[in-house]
Each structure stands twice: as C-alpha cells, then as structure tokens.
Image (tube, coloured by chain):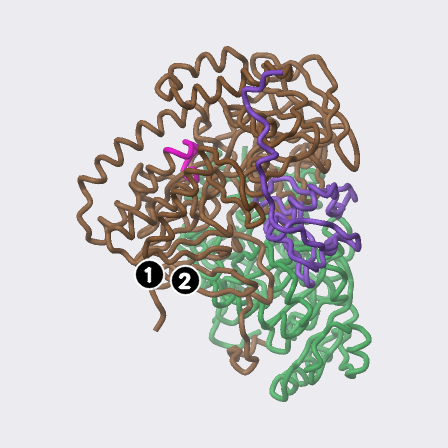
Chain colours: A brown, B green, C purple
Amino acid sequence: MRDVFDIAILGAGPAGGNAALASVQQGLRTVLLDEQPSAGGQVWRARSASILAAPETPESRAGAHLRSKLSTSDITYLKDARVWQIAREGDIWQLQVLSGGQSDAVEANALILATGAREFVQPVPGWTTPGVIGLAGATALFKQNLTLPGRRTVVSGTGPLLFYVASEIRRLGGEVAAVVTPNTRADWLRALPALAGKPRLLGRGALWIADLMLARVPIYWGHAVTEVLGHDAVSDVKIARLDAEWAPQKHVATIGADSLCLGNGLIPQIEPAQMLGVPIHYDAALGGWVPDVSPDGVTTIASLYLCGDGTGIRGANAAALQGRLVGLRVAADLGRNTQQARTAAQRAWRRAACFGRSMTVLSVARPGLQAVTSEDTIICRCESITRRQLLEEIDKGAASANAVKSGLRVGMGPCGGKFCQTAIAALIAKSRGRDVSTVAPPTARPPLRPVPLGAAAGSFDYDDLPIPKPAPL
Amino acid sequence: MTYDIAIVGGGIMGCSTALRLAEDGMRPVVLDQGDLAQGASGVNAGTLSLQIKRVKLMPYALKGHHLWAKMGDAVGFVKTGGYTLAFNAREAELLQERQTLKAQAGAPIEFVSNNHLRAAEPALTQSVVAASYCAEDGYANASLTGQYYRGRLKDAGIEYHEQCAVSAISKGGVFELLSPHGTIRAKRLLLAAGAWLKPLAALLDVDLPVTARINTVSVTERIPALINTVIGHATGLLTMKQKANGTVLIGGGWQGRGTPQDGRGEVDTATVRSNLALAQYAVPALGAARVLRSWTGFEANVPDFYPLAGALPGVSDAFVLGCVRGGYTIGPYIGQLMGDLILGRAPEMPLFDPGRDFQEEAI
Amino acid sequence: MIRLVADQSAQIRRAAEVRFSFDGADIIGHAGENLAAALLRAGCLILRNAPHDDTPRGAFCCMGLCQECVVRIDGQVVEACRSEVAEGLIVERAG
C-alpha cells in the first residue's frame, strides 16, 4: 500500500518551507518537494557544495535558518525533485516526480503549491547574446556559486533587485560598468513612506547607492537598455532616456561591458495552478496574471492551496508569513485547531504583503517600455521569432495567445512560453486595442518541466498493453 | 442583414464548406465559439495516413490527401510514406486482414519485408513481426489550420466571427442565432461544431447521438533525425512522426479526461505514460528525448463511426457536417461535397444521412 | 577610495579543483560547482546555437526554466544550470 501524505508542498522557498514547518508542527505528515539540491527557493538559495567558506549575508542567514529548521523536523524533504505532472486521482493528489533520472509518484490528501516567481525581461535587441542574464538569474549565480556574470557588468532593471545585484557584483569583486533603471528618483521617493517602516532595508539600500556613487559608478535614473552589442559575447550596451511612460527617447550612451544583468520585475509562476483549473485574473500591481486565492491560500479547487509569490509578487517576507498561514489553514481543514495562530499569522502577513506590494509597484514595467523591442528583436527565444513576425501573424487574424502560439510556434519551444508569453500578450493587446488583462495566457499543459520520455514512460511490459476493441474497419 | 447561410463551427468542416459555397456566390458567415480550428482541426497529431482510414471511406480519403497536397507548405504538408507495425502474431493477423481490405478499396498499401523496414527505419525496434507500407501517407501541421483558414476565408471575402458562441437558435422565416456579437440571421444553417454538435443541435430540439473521444498527443524537443516516415500500429494505439524541425509527435488515441463542455480536456497521467512507453518500445532511442508538452483534443463520433453529412433531421434548410472518421484527412474534401449539396447540386460522392438508423450497418 | 560595500572575494574558499570537459575542451572547475557557473567562470559563454537562426546562446535565467543553457551529458539533454561538475565529467553540446 502506498504512502499517502497528509500534505504535499511543491516548492521549498520561503513560502513552501514555512508552510511545511507549520504543517508538520500540527502533526501532519508532510512531504516537501523542490527541484533544487537545497531548500530556499530563489531568494534564499543555498550555496553549492563547491563553496567551502564565504561571508554570510542576511539572505544566506535566512536561508540557513530555514534549512536548519527543515532538517531537524519530521518533514519528508525531497530535493532535486522535479514535479512534471499533478492530477487528482479519486480522493488524493498524485504528483509525478522526476528525480535521479527516474519518475515516481508522491501522493497526498492536500496539496500546497508554492511555485514562486520567475523574471520578466522586455526583449531588447541583442538580449539573446551570451553574457546577458536575468536580474533574478544573476542572484542565483551569486547565491549558489558566488560567481560573477563577467568582468565588467551593466546592471539594468526595476525595483530594489537592481541595487542588490549591483552591490553583490561589487561585494564579489566585480566591476559595475553602470546601473540603469527606468525608475526615477521620484519613483523611489514615492516609495519612501513604505520603506520608512523598514529601517534596515532602507539602510541597506541607501548604503548600496552611496557605495556606487562613491565608486563613481554611473547611475542612470529614468533610463533603459535599448540594445546589446556583440555577437558571441557582449561588447557594449546602449542606453536611452525614457519619458514618463517609459518609452525610450534619445540615445544617451554606449557603455563598454562584457555582461548585462537585465530584468523588469517578477511574474508569478501560475502554470501548475492554471493546469489544475484554478481561475486566474490580471493584477498589474502583483506582477500580472495571478490565481484566484484567499489570503490563507484557499482556491475553488478542493484540497488545493497556494501561497507565496506564485499568488502575486509580495516579496520574501510576505511569502514566508503566508506559507505559515496557509500551512495552518490546511491543518485546520484537516481537523486541527489553529484559529488563533491563523489570526495572528494573517495580520502579520497583511503588513508584509502591503510593503511587498509597494516594492512590486516600483518594479512593474510601464507600457512605454515595450518600445525597446524593435521590429527585428527576437521575442520568443526558443524559436527565434521576432516582433515583426508576431505582428504579421496578428495582422493576419490571430487574436489570442493560443492562436498566435499555434500559428508561429511561439511558446511551443522548450521553455513553454515562460519568457515570451508576457511580451506577446502585450503585443496582441496593443495591436488589437485591447487591455492586456483581456489577453489570457495560453492553456497550461503537462509536463510542468521537460521530462525525458523514458523516465515519464516508466517500466513497460508489452503484454500489459490493453488490447483495444479493433477500430471500426 | 441576412446571410445565405450561417455555419456554426469554424474548423476544417465549416471552413471548407464555406469556401465551396462562396465559390458559387453564396454569402456564408462562419461562427466559432473560440479561435478558428482550435477544436479537433487544430490540435490533432496531423497524421494523413490512408492505412488508418475505414474501408468505405477510402475513396474520400484519397481525395482528401490530394487536397492536402495542394494546400502544401501553407499547412506544412509532407508526404513521407508510412508504415504500420505489428509486434506479435495477433497484431500481424489483424494487420494482414485490414490492410488487405484497405488496399482493395484503393489505397496503395503493400506488405513489406523486415529488410525493407530496417533500411527505411533503422531506429525501429527489432521486435517487428509484420509491417505494411503506403507511399501516399504523410502529415500536415494541425497547428497551422486556424491561421490557414483565416487567410482563405479572408481571401474569399467570407465573414467570420471568433469568440462567438451561439447560445440559442430559432427558426422563423429565417434562422436567428443569438451570440455575443448580436443576433445573426441566415436563410440556411450548417452545424459543423464537431464535439459540440450534440448541445448545438439541441438548441433546435434535434437529438444527435454524438459522443467525443479525448485523444492525447505528446511532442518532444528537437532531436537529431531518428524517424523518417509516419509510423502507425496495427491496433491504432501508436502514431509517431518526426517533423522537419526535429520534434517528434506521438499519438494513438490514448484517452484523456473531460468533456467538450468542460473545456479543452485534461491529459490522463496513466494513459499518456502508456502512450510514451509504447513509443519508446517502437523506437528505443526515444528514451532520452525530453517530452515538452502533452495535450488532448476531442474527436466526435456517432455510433456507427461514419460521418454525419447531410440534412439536419426535422429542420428544413439546416444541415450538419461532422463526426467524420478521419476528419482531418477527409475534411477538406467532404466540405466540398457538403457545399455542393447545399448549393442544390448532386455531390460527386454519396454523403451520409444524419437521420439514418445508427444501429444498422446501412452504409 | 572608500568602499561602503567591501570586496569580499578574497574571503571565498572553494572546493578542490576538478577537471572536466565541454565540447572537447578541458575545463577546470571546483568539485560540486554548478556547471553553468563553472563554464561561465572558465569563459565558456556559448553553450549552443539556436535551432532556427543559429545564434549563439548561453545561460540566461540561471533557474532551470529558459532552457538556453542545455547541454548533453551521458546522452541526455539537461540544463547546465541544474547540473554539477565532477572530476572527469564529459559535457557535450546539445545543439
């Protein structure tokens, strides 16, 4: 008889990790799955085994703290575990998990999806050049491997992540060629009231900016990257000033660099929830398409809960608090008395969520930025489809994300549309004079990650093949 | 304004009929609940194989193949030839019996030796016991169907409405169809909504015995050339083809979950795994290829598995076209026949009375 | 020059060096290091060429999602950013 857990949690970042801790503390048999070798998600990503010693940072401490609590708990923790399919089989959730080249099933009564976020990059000419990495991707390099993207890096993007990445490059001995941000000083001043309640964060941020200024690293406020030069590698980065709606104006500088970190905010990873039938809606201030879910993680799908940045970008602290809240809620739904703890947890979450939202608002790209994508810019990286090709397809009548995908293969490549879908939806909306909130993402399908056919197929005995009724002749 | 005919369902059936009607001066309007050809027409595996067609539908399939070849690059048509495989004695017997009848019905199908098969498809498992071959077999790219017909309808000046689900149909002097785009009026009506025919016909109190199978298709990442033709299986449980871009499409009618009313349907884990396992059995080197996506599509059928193609029972000036077994292949041709019928001409091949007794093998 | 953010690179200690290969070339990394990171540090930015337009590609999202960093190890296509280096590892291009 197979082991059925009380709760399965997909994603061991701040949200999932804390959901697991809350759940196991209530005596529930909990399995936590994550595709990385260690828990921590993106923001609290652990160092690889190749790092024997390195100075701690607030993020590394937070991650170590979570990992330590997880390891001393009764949580069944499955690492390097890639969930490629999820389905309801009768009364339970069945997850197909790829680990070590093999696929196995994990079953649980309740399921919490804590799938986090990925980044959004508005495509820019040359963004596919080796040496261009995402802003959040850069943090993965730093945290896991203490590795720099190059010797001389332009850092470009929105929100606080930008300054974090720039300061990390300096801390790890690299050179920041320039910091480029569509945000203006005024945008940041508007965010000050929210930051006033976070003196440590404010202090850190101010330190990073002061350090850059002292080091004479140019900070281009209200600017964006408009082109990456170089073919096999980055040689230069061109930038332009932006107008109030973030549309690029005149070219301002060409900066020599061998690498570029580029990002325009984070998007919730909603595909697993979408695939399981959770309705979604558009909320620009939360990063775009988000699932319909209550603060304590409840969806319209029985026994399916969501928490963390996968429900809307609110930041690591909010994610951690919501994880705990949702873990407690699932416990309540499974018969435990957690009412008091939940009330307190929800209050704490609301405060953190409010702050997180104000940072996200800074990070979300304004529509004018779409103009950095020229006619010949590749939008779908996997299939090398350009803006021009997409506009032609839309002009010929393709009016939905699914229709454009069918006609041009955008989103049919290995990444499954993760890095092109947002820009394409905006293009469809603009061409058709619609609001982007009316261009729904394409249908979410399994596998949730590419899976080797042999692993997905499992063991097979030809004689076990069902003999179908012969097709009508 | 009153159209000459309202066609509900903008897949291959509805669109090919519309084109024939417009050729002769009729003014159709095509309505689809979603994007054109996002039903079976757009999500099937694209197989164009005479070896899997019903014996009595073979003449239609041959005409259909001819039309697909004419559509050519615009729909990604490729004639690769195709093999149907048998892996044991029972399958070999089935293969022998069926392919012989299909060859007699006009398909250029022959049985081939093991050596022939090895030379043509070196990546196949050694466990093949018998195989048949048809040089006319191939495939097209089902994903391109929607955009293809949008272009053709536009070129023919045919009006179409997407995201336009019909919620009510009444018949006074003309048909009045209630839709999100307002009330559409037409002198005639063609129901061509595939898996959605039953609820659609019910709007006119007509009961069509339409059911839907939920077929699963999977696609891999690009891999180096491994499969050269369209591969089928004596029981129909496997179809495989490798496209020019290197991706391998795997199908075989494995059943997913869901109903047409619920939306697109869902992949069933157990059946897709069996489908993939069978693919790996046939071509062992596929094991390392990563599957990028699996999906389902609805295939509509009536109890005798022959088409519905003719007058809608009990409603004058109304017609129905769908549930064609092998609809992707035969669709472009049977749409022309349907158009001829509606125009008052005798179609060059017999159609299939939707009012027939489905229990009797009347066809 | 005053630095408010100190250069801490000298305080990083990495595991023992290991030799592995990529596309036939010998590369030095550290035991347990992320493959994409090791290749980056060794100056191997181009991991493959894109199928349609043959443009050079390398690691982009560094999170196992974009599939730009895929390589072939033991006949299996995998993301370099989700793989680890080890002594004697043979890594081939996947495209």
What amino acid type is highlighted by mark number 1? Phe
Q: Is residue C51 left or right of residue B289?
A: right
Image coordinates of residue A36 in percent, x first then y, are 51, 50
Residue in view at x 72 percent, y 74 percent:
B124
Residue A179's image quarter? Answer: top right
- Output the chain of dot 1: A
Q: Nearer the viewer, residue A187 or B275?
A: A187
Q: Nearer the viewer, residue B347 or B7?
A: B7
Image coordinates of residue A306 in percent, x first then y, are 37, 44
Residue B109's image quarter? Answer: bottom right
Residue at image mark 1: A5
Image coordinates of residue A141 in percent, x first then y, are 59, 39
Label 1's element?
strand
Residue at image mark 2: A106
Whichever of callouts 1 and 2 sits on the residue coming sooner in the sequence is 1
**Above or below for A152 versus A399:** above
Task: Check the picture and name the quadrant holding the N terminus of chain A.
Answer: bottom left
CB under 8 Å between discs 1 and 2: yes
Residue A184 appears in the picture as rendered: yes
- Output the chain of dot 2: A
Total numbered circles: 2
